[in-house]
Amino acid sequence: MNVAVIFGGNTVEHEISILTGIQILNSIHPKKYHVIPLYLNKQNKFMMGENFNSVDTFLRDDVILEEVTLTQAGVKKRGKFSKIIPIDVVINAVHGVGAESGELAGFLSILNIPYTSSDVLGASIGQDKITFKKILSYDKIPTLPFLSYEEKDFFQRKDEIIEEIISFSLPIIVKPSNLGSSIGIKKVENKEDIQLALHQAFKYDKRVLIEPLLQDVKEFNCAVIDDLVSCVEEVCTSNSFLTFQDKYEQSLSQHILPANINNDLENEIMELAKKVYNITQNKGVVRIDFLYDNNENQLYVNEINTIPGSFAYYLFEDKGIYFDELIDILIEKALKDDYEKKQKIKSFSSNALKYHGKKIK
């Protein structure tokens, strides 16, 4: 079976996607699959090369890369007589808006190539924090109260919006609506910093989300693949929220797995994770992040990650599922989903073209 692993992309999470791709290439079973690594560079061009399973490859400036084209028939190298490499399934390991938000899923759907992770709808819902929270609110899933603003509105009524935010809550967290890995997020504790935080967020996105900053909070993560739910992880940090450095660089953050919590809270997190997964029409590995307000003893759904870093494989290890097996599960489900999708009627016979421009009685 030919399995393409796509990673990289023109997103602010480009390097994180490279790390996920490398982990997949080093974990996928080489005797089960013929693996075709496809690096999507920052110009969104598909590239092939050697040693894509090593970080050193992406730190060097002299690496030789070959641009290729992904077609319905497979991967096509340049040249008149180049052989096409057929693709049976794609492992989508691209993080961030511009790819994870449904663009790559839509491209692969047009090519009729089966792929892991969410379809266009689930991917776009998960990437947009404002839309995600509105859907959760509609389905009465506990989530923090929030405000949202568009960039054009902010510059038209700046003073009014700042007063609205002050009346809403301080301190607050300001987030770009379409971004991940805690990029562009800023804590605001006083009126003077509101405008600066909004300007910072608007550098990344035209819409921003504002939430109250909980003073005494615990953070938990839980991943889902269909009916399979991972262990619950507690993430501890000295910062007000999990920063990019907490997640991917050296920091003092700690990961407690499994979380040291009572059965009731553990079950509540797991049940909410499954509900959120289904409500948002997701598939593949999805990680849902939670906040627990210690003062109010209240659990909130915070965010959803439709293609989490490293596919959150470590959350399944306590369940006896390791990364190579997790990849097997993803591939199997991608092929099954694709088969079921292709059983649906996709065409409809009509005389619309025949009667075009004529009055239909």
Image (cartoon, rainbow, N blue to C red):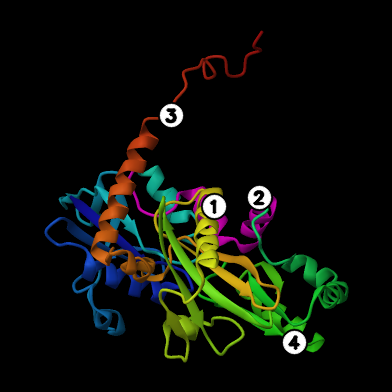
Please determine whether, in this image, residue 135 is positioned above or below residue 30. Answer: above
Q: Are marks 3 and 4 in contact (CB under 8 Å)?
A: no
Q: Which residue is mark 1?
A: 275
Q: Nearer the viewer, mark 2 or mark 4?
A: 2
Point out the tag, 3 or 4, that comes first from the N-terminus. Answer: 4
Residue 307 seen in this snapshot:
yes
Q: Position of residue 163 (x, y in %)?
A: 87, 76
Residue 27 lies left or right of residue 45; in this view the side is left
Residue 278 falls left or right of residue 114:
right
Residue 175 location (% of width, % of height) = 64, 73
Gap in Å between the C-alphas at discs 1 and 4?
Answer: 33 Å
Q: Which residues are magenta?
A: 112-138
- Tell me the kind of residue under disc 4: Glu
Q: Secondary structure at mark 2?
A: loop
Q: Mark 2–mark 1 contact, CB under 8 Å?
A: yes
Mark nearest the camera among 1 and 4 is 1
Which residue is tagged 2?
139
Q: Residue at x 41, y 30 (%)?
A: 344
Q: Which residue is mark 3?
A: 346
**Residue at far front of view:** 263
Whether the residues at callouts 3 and 1 have beta carbons within 8 Å, the answer is no
Q: Give the vertical position of 218 relative to 226 (above or below).
A: below
